[in-house]
């Protein structure tokens, strides 16, 4: 009861990459970088296990960014001539690679890190991939066309590639494949109209557990400032949860602690496993076990015990390493207290 997991990313050690950045530069190259990525993956597996987490991941240590890490192995994308463009409805600017031709995988994308993680933990292993709609929002397009129809075609083209990699990850021994779709909280009407369908295409045919993570973004200033404009109630989930509840996706991850999301929106996910964010990724304050257990208790009014997973609100990548480590321990301790209290 009350399994614990992270949303996905963890901070990169200072010997691997720049710290406290969303798009950090690597500290090495070539074989030395490959070794450093592997070392960081093993380190964070151990930290998660020592913290007592039930479901662990690679912490996305081999990826510079959760979207662009996947795109690095996709043909038809020009990384040499990036353009500056607003993403997430112009919430902030980013340097984006350009889609310039038909999309194809150049080979396996995440085989190395997935197999490494699988070989070094006996815990259930979750692996994250960017969702199709979020990829479309994190690239510049010169091939499919900026009109809505072009974005939809591009999303389903990416979904096909994601499905190829997801099936291979399942064969590598991954237990849960999660697609990250923060764009679902920005383009809610499109998410309900075609985003969920593209997501289902990405997950088609998988026998392992499938998940989608939808949050209000990393704890960076642009996201914190945006959330301050959303008012006393954040109801974005209300527009996409009904479509997700009818979908084939098994698990839904949402932001809860220190948010203004009405908890009763979780009722819209009846029949799904719900990963409830009980750890704030926009604050360095370490949650107490009591706070986490209280958040779990509040969510249990709307989510059955057997479908509840205690999670982080979002990834921890831009956070200080020592803070992230402490929050993982707190997550485990809070879930343990909740088991005592609510079992």
Image (spheres, rainbow, N blue to C red):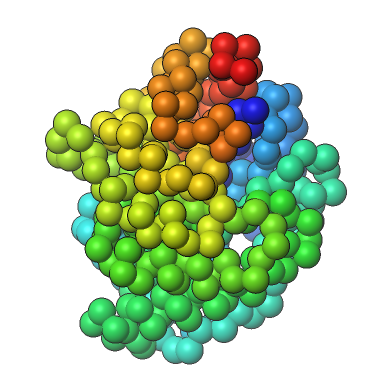
Residue 181 at what x, y percent from top left?
42, 56
Occupied quadrant, residue 334? top right
In the rendered image, the vertical position of residue 199 relative to residue 322, given as above or below? below
In the rendered image, the vertical position of residue 167 relative to residue 90, given as above or below? below
- Judge whether residue 190 can be spotted in this image: yes
Occupied quadrant, residue 342? top right
Residue 225 at what x, y percent from top left?
21, 38
Would residue 136 appear left or right of 85 to someone viewing this image? right
- Judge whether residue 63 can be spotted in this image: no
For the N terminus, the quadrant is top right
Residue 259 at what x, y percent from top left?
31, 31
Would residue 198 appear left or right of 184 to someone viewing this image? right
Taking the spot 47% from the left edge, 61% from the top edge, the residue there is 247
Taking the spot 23% from the left edge, 52% from the top edge, the residue there is 91
Q: Nearer the viewer, residue 261 or 16?
A: 261
Taking the spot 35% from the left edge, 71% from the top edge, the residue there is 194
Taking the spot 76% from the left edge, 48% from the top edge, the residue there is 117
In the rendered image, the vertical position of residue 264 relative to residue 159, given as above or below? above
Residue 21 at what x, y percent from top left?
43, 43
Q: Nearer the viewer, residue 29 or 164?
A: 164
How many numbered marks does the figure carry?
Answer: 0
For the C terminus, the quadrant is top right
């Amino acid at each position: 009861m009350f399994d614990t997991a992270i949303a996905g990313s963890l901070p990169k050690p200072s010997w691997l990459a720049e710290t406290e950045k969303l798009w950090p530069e690597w500290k090495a190259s070539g074989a030395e970088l490959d070794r450093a990525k592997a070392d960081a993956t093993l380190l964070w597996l151990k930290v998660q296990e020592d913290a007592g987490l039930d479901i662990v991941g690679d912490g996305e240590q081999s990826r510079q960014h959760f979207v662009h890490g996947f795109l690095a192995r996709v043909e038809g994308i020009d990384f040499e001539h990036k353009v500056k463009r607003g993403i997430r409805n112009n919430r902030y600017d980013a340097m984006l690679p350009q889609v310039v031709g038909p999309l194809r995988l150049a080979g396996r994308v995440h085989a190395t890190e997935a197999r490494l993680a699988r070989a070094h933990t006996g815990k259930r292993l979750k692996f994250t991939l960017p969702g199709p709609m979020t990829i479309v929002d994190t690239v510049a397009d010169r091939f499919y066309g900026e009109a809505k129809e072009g974005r939809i075609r591009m999303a389903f083209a990416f979904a096909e590639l994601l499905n190829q990699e997801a099936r291979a990850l399942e064969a590598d021994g991954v237990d849960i494949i999660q697609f990250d779709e923060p764009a679902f909280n920005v383009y809610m009407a499109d998410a309900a109209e075609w985003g969920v369908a593209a997501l289902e295409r990405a997950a088609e045919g998988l026998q392992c557990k499938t998940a989608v993570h939808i949050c209000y973004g990393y704890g960076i200033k642009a996201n914190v400032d945006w959330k301050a404009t959303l008012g006393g109630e954040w109801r974005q989930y209300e527009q996409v949860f009904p479509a997700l509840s009818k979908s084939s996706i098994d698990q839904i991850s949402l932001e809860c602690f220190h948010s203004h999301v009405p908890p009763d929106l979780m009722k819209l996910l009846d029949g799904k496993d719900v990963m409830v964010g009980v750890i704030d990724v926009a604050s360095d304050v370490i949650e107490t076990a009591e706070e986490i257990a209280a958040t779990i208790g509040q969510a249990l009014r709307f989510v059955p015990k057997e479908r509840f997973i205690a999670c982080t609100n979002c990834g921890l990548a831009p956070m200080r390493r020592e803070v992230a480590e402490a929050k993982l321990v707190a997550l485990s301790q809070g879930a343990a207290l909740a088991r005592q209290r609510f079992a």
